[in-house]
Image: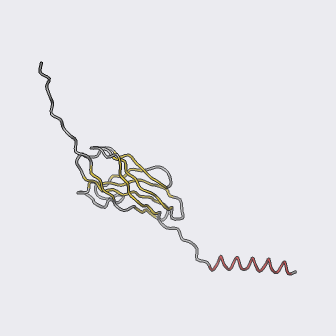
Amino acid sequence: MTTRITSKLAAVLTLATALLSPATAATVPTVATPTSASITNTTATLGGDVTSDGGTTVTEVGVVYAPTWENNNPPLGGYGVTKVKGTGPGGILTVNVSGLDASTAYSFAAYATNAMGTSYSAVGAFSTITPILLPHLKKTL
């Protein structure tokens, strides 16, 4: 009899604890540390780090960027903003960007989206390289 009462009491305590404990609500993902690398006059490798899915599945990751003069805090759908989708649900994210203008400052952010919304890394910045034009030399014989 004592065993039945003890097991029923344990079940009641487990249920009470579950009812009284606040549930952890899902939030937007957490995205940290914007990164830029391998910058040329027209290409760059950009990324970030999705450090948390917010408690629900990440459905899209990527990078948004724009020339800084046009938009220095580029959100999805923002003026002059280009979106490049990444792959994978989270972790380290890198995308290759091409078609950039030479000698131009850009602002960018990594982003991640789940059912609760979209979040961004801090805004990063980089500048494309100015091409070096060498004079055309004629060989004289």
Residue shown at the point (22%, 45%) measured from the top left: 130
Image coordinates of residue 15 in percent, x first then y, are 69, 77
* Along the line of sight, the residue nearer the viewer: 110 or 139: 139
Image coordinates of residue 71 in percent, x first then y, are 27, 59
Identify the image's colour scheme: rainbow, by chain, secondary structure or one colour.
secondary structure
Does residue 1 appear left or right of residue 60 in this picture?
A: right
Looking at the picture, does residue 55 appear above or below residue 101?
Answer: below
Q: Which quadrant, please, contains the N terminus?
A: bottom right
Outermost residue, left side: 140
Residue shown at the point (47%, 63%) measured from the top left: 29
* Along the line of sight, the residue nearer the viewer: 15 or 3: 3
Does residue 13 appear left or right of residue 52 in this picture?
A: right
Q: Quadrant of residue 48?
A: bottom left
Outermost residue, top side: 141
Outermost residue, right side: 1
Residue shown at the point (40%, 48%) measured from the top left: 95
* Along the line of sight, the residue nearer the viewer: 85 or 6: 6
Residue shown at the point (36%, 55%) measured from the top left: 64
Does residue 103 appear left or right of residue 52 in this picture?
A: left
